[in-house]
Image: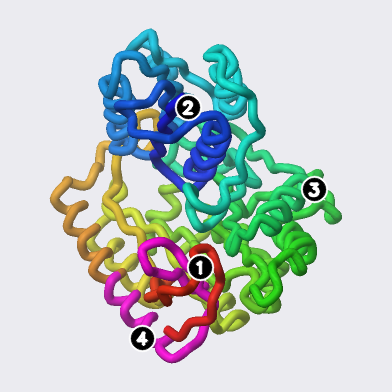
């Protein structure tokens, strides 16, 4: 059996796609869509533009050959299953919770020998191993429909996460990235129970469980937090980042979205500009080596030139090491898409370009500030290594892919 997995969207989708690939690789060979018997398309619908790309991807999969079965899963499929089912009889829309079951059923129906899923570690998989520990979101930002597609926030049991990560550590993983739609809301137990395991508690368990699961002379596996909302950065997590000596990467992706308190309020973000700035200052004071990356939306409906300047000023004050900046894209079904005060496309594009230019400036300044410092870096393909602070470095030719090595920035 030949298969192809097409991934669109966020890091959570990437982890889910890796899991599908590992399950399929145990039974067949990954190949191009044109030669695939089964194509899995993991969709995204976070913006109107993402929705367009998703629809193109599914149509492309159907055109690739006329025999392939196409499993469509992910957020776009959850929001508008009927559209994808109507494209072709070969399409089957599958919810995330049933994807593994559907893959196994399809393999069985085709007479493919049963096999346990491969671990997504080593050749054929990404260097970093992603582990999804949380799904869904209880927030309702006015530009976002993901809370509709993914549903209410849920968390995996900590015991299962620890077992999975220990297995990856034994298999030689150098870095494990914890992911979730709203990762900081992780809670194994009742939310109001002070004894429930939250994100910092989960990380402490992971550090303890994997401390000795590495080859002689190698460094223990490190953990990275993929993205966390500002409201979820609590004292326990800050203390852990400060004390973990790099085993929890001193890097956080902290979405800003806008630097104007008025715009943040209209986005229904649960903080204002002053609170975000105070959090960043507290983080830098507690973890001096911390690197911060962020997301920023340019041209949210009603955003004025002055409010956009507030965003530039706050981003500069936070000295982000990396900025993901993009123009606001209307997503049907969200409150922001219905607003009559949409910012003209040319202004949105100009603001996004200004943010990207600032992002380049800040990244160069942060790299210069770190010059001469030593960090553990994860060796990746293509002769590069990724530092703890998320900067690419030139890797030694004899450094094994997937290993952690000390490198000077």
Residue in the picture at 53% in, 44% down: 15
Give the CA distance from mark 1 to mark 2: 35 Å
Give the CA distance from mark 1 to mark 3: 31 Å
Magenta stretch: give its range: 360-389
Give the CA distance from mark 3 to mark 4: 41 Å
The answer to whether marks 3 and 4 mark residues whose Cβ atoms lie closer than 8 Å is: no
Give the CA distance from mark 4 to mark 2: 43 Å
Q: Residues within 10 Å of mark 4 (few under 14, many from 20)?
A: few
Residue in the picture at 48% in, 41% down: 13
- Who is closer to the viewer here, 150 or 389? 389
Q: Is residue 276 above or below residue 126?
A: below
Q: Earlier in the sequence, mark 1 or mark 3?
A: 3
Please give left or right for residue 341 compared with residue 314 in the image: left
* Nearer to us: label 1 or label 4: 1
User: What x and y, as percent, mark residue 341?
Assistant: 25, 42
Q: Earlier in the sequence, mark 1 or mark 4?
A: 4
Residue 400 marker: 1
User: What x and y, as percent, mark residue 93?
Assistant: 47, 19
Q: Residues within 10 Å of mark 2 (few under 14, many from 20)?
A: many
* Nearer to us: label 1 or label 3: 1
The residue tagged with tag 4: helix, strand or loop?
helix
The residue tagged with tag 3: helix, strand or loop?
helix
Please give left or right for residue 15 compared with residue 36 in the image: right
Residue 368 marker: 4
The answer to whether marks 1 and 2 mark residues whose Cβ atoms lie closer than 8 Å is: no
Please give left or right for residue 249 compared with residue 142 in the image: right
Q: Is residue 228 above or below residue 239?
A: above
Q: How many marks?
A: 4
User: Is residue 339 visible in this depiction of the protein?
Assistant: no
Q: Which residue is mark 2?
A: 73
The residue tagged with tag 2: helix, strand or loop?
strand
Q: Which residue is mark 3?
A: 159
């Amino acid at each position: 059996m030949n298969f192809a997995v097409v991934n669109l969207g966020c890091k959570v989708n990437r982890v889910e796609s890796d899991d599908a690939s590992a399950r399929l690789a145990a039974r067949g060979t990954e190949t191009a869509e044109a030669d695939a018997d089964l194509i899995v398309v993991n969709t995204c619908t976070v913006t109107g533009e993402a929705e367009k790309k998703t629809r193109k991807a599914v149509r492309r999969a159907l055109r690739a050959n006329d025999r392939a079965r196409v499993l469509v899963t992910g957020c776009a499929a959850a929001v508008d299953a009927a559209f994808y089912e109507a494209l072709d009889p070969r399409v089957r829309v599958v919810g995330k919770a049933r994807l593994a079951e559907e893959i196994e059923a399809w393999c069985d129906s085709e007479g493919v020998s049963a096999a346990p899923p491969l671990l997504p570690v080593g050749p054929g998989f990404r260097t970093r191993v992603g582990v999804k520990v949380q799904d869904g979101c209880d927030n309702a930002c006015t530009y976002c429909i993901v809370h509709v597609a993914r549903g209410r926030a849920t968390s995996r049991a900590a015991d299962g996460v620890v077992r999975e990560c220990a297995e990856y550590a034994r298999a030689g993983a150098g870095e494990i990235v914890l992911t979730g739609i709203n990762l900081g809301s992780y809670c194994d137990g009742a939310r109001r129970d002070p004894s429930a395991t939250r994100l910092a508690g989960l990380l402490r368990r992971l550090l303890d469980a994997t401390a000795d699961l590495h080859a002689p002379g190698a460094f223990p596996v490190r953990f990275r937090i993929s993205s966390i909302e500002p409201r979820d950065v609590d004292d326990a997590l800050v203390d852990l980042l400060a004390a973990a000596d790099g085993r929890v990467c001193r890097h956080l992706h902290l979405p800003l979205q806008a630097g104007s308190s008025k715009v943040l309020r209209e986005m229904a973000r649960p903080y204002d500009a002053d609170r975000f700035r105070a959090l960043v200052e507290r983080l830098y004071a507690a973890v001096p080596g911390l690197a911060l990356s962020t997301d920023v939306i340019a041209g949210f409906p009603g955003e004025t030139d002055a409010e956009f300047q507030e965003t530039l000023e706050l981003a500069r004050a936070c000295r982000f090491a990396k900025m993901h900046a993009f123009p606001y894209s209307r997503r049907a079904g969200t409150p922001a898409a219905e607003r009559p005060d949409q910012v003209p496309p040319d202004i949105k594009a100009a603001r996004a370009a200004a943010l990207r230019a600032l992002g380049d400036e800040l990244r160069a300044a942060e790299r210069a500030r770190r010059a001469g410092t030593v960090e553990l870096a994860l060796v990746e393909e293509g002769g590069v290594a990724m530092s703890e602070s998320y900067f690419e470095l030139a890797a030694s030719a004899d450094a094994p892919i997937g290993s952690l090595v000390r490198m000077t920035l």
